[in-house]
Amino acid sequence: MTYTGTQVAKTLKSLKVPLENAPKILTKLATKIGGVTTAATAAGAASSGAGAAIAGTGAAATATTASVGTLAAGLGIFAVIAAIVVAAGIGIYRAITADARAAEQAAKKAKELADAYEELKTKTQEFNDTVNNYEEAKKGLEKLTAGTEEYKQKVEEANEAAKKLLEENEELAGSFTYNSSTGLITIAPDSLKEV
């Protein structure tokens, strides 16, 4: 019986056999076919077909058991050994590149987390600076006389900081009061601590 490498490769592919398992299957196939010459030639043909399928050519050499004889058996064994080496190489390559891809993804995620942390750190610092500006402006009012130009400027400073805090932090929306006589927006101190 004659087996072409393409036939064996197509059969392995239709059975959805991973290429790294091809050497094991070829060895079993060689045992089932029987005879050193027949087994080696069939395994060689299958290996050639699998190799051609890997290369994407879709073609492989035809090996026949009756006409090639001892030379084919020797070449078939060489082809099986070559197929095993190639399959091992493919397995190693896939393992190495899988680790590299996983490391690349981990590095990407780490960068995203670092960027998110930096953004959060910056926003926290901005919030704290705005709270400090608000608190300082409010304390400055204690030393000034209501109705004076300096007092109005400090009220304006405190209100600008309060407005910024209210715009950037929705959770403060219900925690402020407005004193119409002084014009001062006051945010509850406990609310500032909760943000």
Image (spheres, rainbow, N blue to C red):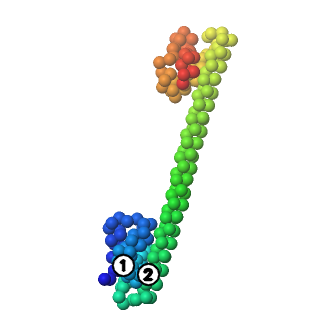
Residue at the extreme left of the image, as rendered = 1
Q: Is residue 132 left or right of residue 163?
A: right
Q: Nearer the viewer, residue 92 or 137?
A: 92
- Residue type pointed to by label 2: Gly
Count neighbours of disc 1 (C-alpha within 10 A) and say few if under 14, some if 14 to 19, many if 20 or more. few
In this rendering, the answer to whether 143 lies above or below 18 is above
Residue 76 bears which disc, if any?
A: 2
Residue 114 visible? The answer is yes
Q: Nearer the viewer, residue 21 or 186?
A: 21
In what quadrant of the picture does the C terminus appear? top right
Residue 53 visible? The answer is no
Q: Nearer the viewer, residue 137 or 39?
A: 39
In the image, what residue occupies the spot 65% across and 19% down?
136
Residue 126 bears which disc, if any?
A: none
In this rendering, the answer to whether 65 lies above or below 156 is below
| Image x and y of residue 54, in percent | 43, 71
Q: How many marks?
A: 2
Considering only order in the chain, which callout, 2 or 1, is on the residue closer to the N terminus? 1
- Residue type pointed to by label 1: Gly
Identify the element where label 1 is drawn. loop
| Image x and y of residue 114, in percent | 58, 42
Count neighbours of disc 2 (C-alpha within 10 A) and say few if under 14, some if 14 to 19, many if 20 or more. many
- What distance separates the C-alpha of mark 1 from that of mark 2? 14 Å
Q: Nearer the viewer, residue 174 or 164?
A: 174
Q: Which residue is mark 1?
A: 34
Residue 156 location, quadrant: top right
Q: Is residue 191 left or right of residue 26?
A: right
| Image x and y of residue 138, in percent | 62, 16
In the image, what residue occupies the spot 63% across and 27% down?
129
